[in-house]
Image (cartoon, helix red, strand yellow):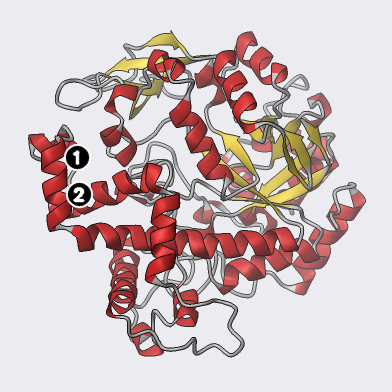
Amino acid sequence: MIFKRASGILLHPTSLPGPCGIGDLGPAAFQFVDFLAETGTALWQVLPLGPTGYGDSPYQCFSAFAGNPYLISPDALLEDGLLYQEDLADPPPFPADRVDYGAVIPWKLHLLNTAYRRFREHTLPPSPIPNSQSPTPTLQSLAVFRRDHAAWLDDFALFMAIKEHFGCGAWTDWPAPLRRRDPAALAAFADGHAEEIERHAFWQFLFFRQWEKLRAYARQRGITLIGDIPIFVAHDSADVWAHPELFFLDDDGSPAVVAGVPPDYFSPAGQLWGNPLYRWEVHKRENYAWWIARLRSVLSLVDLVRLDHFRGFAAYWEVPGEAETAENGRWAPGPGADFLAALRESLGIVETPVSRGLPIIAEDLGVITPDVDAMRREFDLPGMKVLVFAFDGDPENVFLPHNYTRDCVVYTGTHDNDTALGWYQRVGEKERDFARRYLARDGHDIAWDLIRAAWGSVAVFAIAPMQDLLGLDNRARMNYPGNPSGNWSWRMSPGVLDAALRARLRETNFLYGRLAG
């Protein structure tokens, strides 16, 4: 891949400020694009955009193709005439610095149900926004959307309607005819619940409609969007229910084997992720059609993607489905270069303002064997470096900037790590001392010390989580892997993207040759 040196910010839309309890695709998202453009920052990286379920994790979604309806902007629905100002009266007392999912979800569902009801009642007035460029949605535009996305949307809307009907439980707990996708049972359910199915399709229509406007604005301002594709999908998803032949499942639909990582120094029992594993021989026979469709779908929303757990395409840790820990697993071969060659042939050459080639960043963290690195290099994919992993005292540490090659993306940290300040506060004095010596700084502004080191490196892209640009500690951390709850909740406070921060970021981009525009 051919790259242009650039910088970026990692910020999931849920973390944007706003009045409705959760960041969304409304005014704050467009203002963030303006912030990036004005500071010469070319990249906006987000986490997976799918509909979240238990634990609110964007890495455990009900679909690998659908969008998260909680990201739909009420402001945009006001502009469309699907909501009125009185619909937004008396919201719950949402905290400003975090997402309270227990309060947000029923509130957003109330608004989305109101929007759908108004849509179906044909009571839409002309848009109340002067000179609005947002024509009111119509039955025809919804029908066109459903036709264009039928390959995944039909199954997803039906899946969500059945799930809702049976109290939101896992699909393996449904009656056997629906669980096993008996055609007569599915047809009977669809006939009796057409409105519920259409409602879920309508919410997807709203999400894609709003995201497309945001993406078009980002393109207009020269901003490249980076998305994220988890290697595995959630077991309780429309993907597994609709395509059981692609996964190792028992007769009752439960996973026969699941994903994880083996025991190591940090986790003596390993990590048991629980995702069902792919039957790669079936995917290969179908020329990886489901995976190619998945990549195409995500690339309809973003310009580049981070391919999570890249080493799993070479080999993955397979654990028996009934296991309680990941200790008794085995390494099983992945699809390897054959999979990436199929992607390259199908996707062709993708060109963005900052890159040209296969639009993938390989998440190659952890223990990487030579075959994984060789596969990444064969397909010219940049790998990842994380600065908070660098300061163990060994000058040969691969995460130290002087050991980088140009074909990598450096992050001060990721959504799964401490913030830069949180890391510095947590680690021992030996690590802090090495960092101060290496960076030639006293550590009083450690987050920006790391930002300068990342931006000044030879890595083609340098990216920092928004928390690090704001110098926040671990109270702003996005995720603690292994914690079942309390994650994904941090929100940026209103007004923090001030003139001083804009000037500092723009100057840093200029000094290190990363200024866009």
Residue sitting at x 50%, y 50%: 478
Name the residue carrying label 2.
163
Residue sitting at x 67%, y 20%: 376
Foreground residue among 429 and 323:
323
Describe the element under mark 2 as helix, strand or loop.
helix
Residue sitting at x 31%, y 30%: 243
Q: Count of labels shown?
A: 2
Quadrant where the C terminus sits is: bottom right
**Which quadrant of the structure image shows residue 433?**
top right
Q: Amino acid at mark 2?
A: Lys
**Which quadrant of the structure image shows residue 481?**
top left
Name the residue carrying label 1.
171
Q: CA distance from mark 1 to mark 2?
A: 7 Å
In the displayed structure image, the side of residue 275 where residue 25 appears, left or right: right
Foreground residue among 152 and 423:
152
Discs 1, 2 touching: Cβ within 8 Å: yes
Describe the element under mark 1 as helix, strand or loop.
helix
Q: Reply above or below: 120 against 392.
A: below
